[in-house]
Image (cartoon, rainbow, N blue to C red):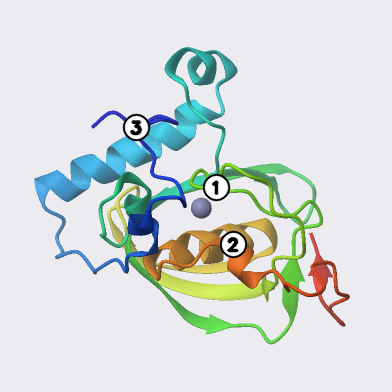
Amino acid sequence: MLINNDTIIKDTDPLIRTKSEPVPLPLSKEDEDLLRQMHQYVVDSTDEEKAEKFNLRPSVGISAIQLGIPKQLTAIVIDDYDKEGNPIRHEFMLANPKIVSSSVQQAYLESGEGCLSVAEEHEGHVVRAARVKVRAYDLITNQYIEIRARGYLAIVLQHELDHFKGVLFYDHINKDDPFKEIPGALVI
Ligand SMILES: [Zn+2]
């Protein structure tokens, strides 16, 4: 499957609002190939040369419904820093991920969110849980895993898992007051 900025479906296509179904495990060859290609897209998308050459939009995650396939598959690659300030890469190829718990504390990205399926900018606080615990099958490590995520990773996981419900980031922006103060929220 060719994955680029032309083949990724946009929010102008009602398909993006489709709910995604869990996939059978162990993964079929077809689902495994799809997940690997999605992961490759995310990796290549942050390589300036490849992005330019192959029409890739830089991203940290992609979900299968963005290719028009309503399956609970998502690939995430994030270069971040740990608590001590050392560079760390969070990299997952997840099947059937589920949020099993969320913090009461909320969080949002100071610069707002973007999405491969959203061409326009939507400004405002995209309010989410500051921490989430996610259980999933992960194809990178080939096992069931539990991710205790905070900060940017927690935001990205919630963004991608929202795609399974047909929810887009701007659905979380307060329409009347996009930059409304969120008491106690973690600003990332
Ligand atoms: Zn998205």
Q: Amino acid at mark 2?
A: Phe
Q: Which residue is mark 3?
A: 3
- Residue drawn at 34 percent across, 47 percent down: 140
Could you tell me residue 180's position as x and y percent? 85, 74
Image mark for residue 169: 2
Left or right: 128 in relation to 99: right
Q: Nearer the viewer, residue 21 or 129?
A: 21
- Residue drawn at 76 percent across, 55 percent down: 123
CA distance for labels 1 and 2: 9 Å
Label 1 CB-ligand 1 distance < 8 A: yes
**Badge 1: residue crowd in 10 Å (few <14, some 14–19, many ≥20):** some
Mark 2: which secondary structure? Answer: helix
Mark 3: which secondary structure? Answer: loop
Q: Are marks 1 and 2 in contact (CB under 8 Å)?
A: yes
**Badge 2: residue crowd in 10 Å (few <14, some 14–19, many ≥20):** many
Mark 1: which secondary structure? Answer: loop
Of pointers 3 and 2, the one earlier in the residue sequence: 3
Quarter of the figure that contains the N terminus: top left
Image mark for residue 118: 1
Of pointers 1 and 2, the one earlier in the residue sequence: 1
Q: Amino acid at mark 3?
A: Ile
Does residue 76 show up? no
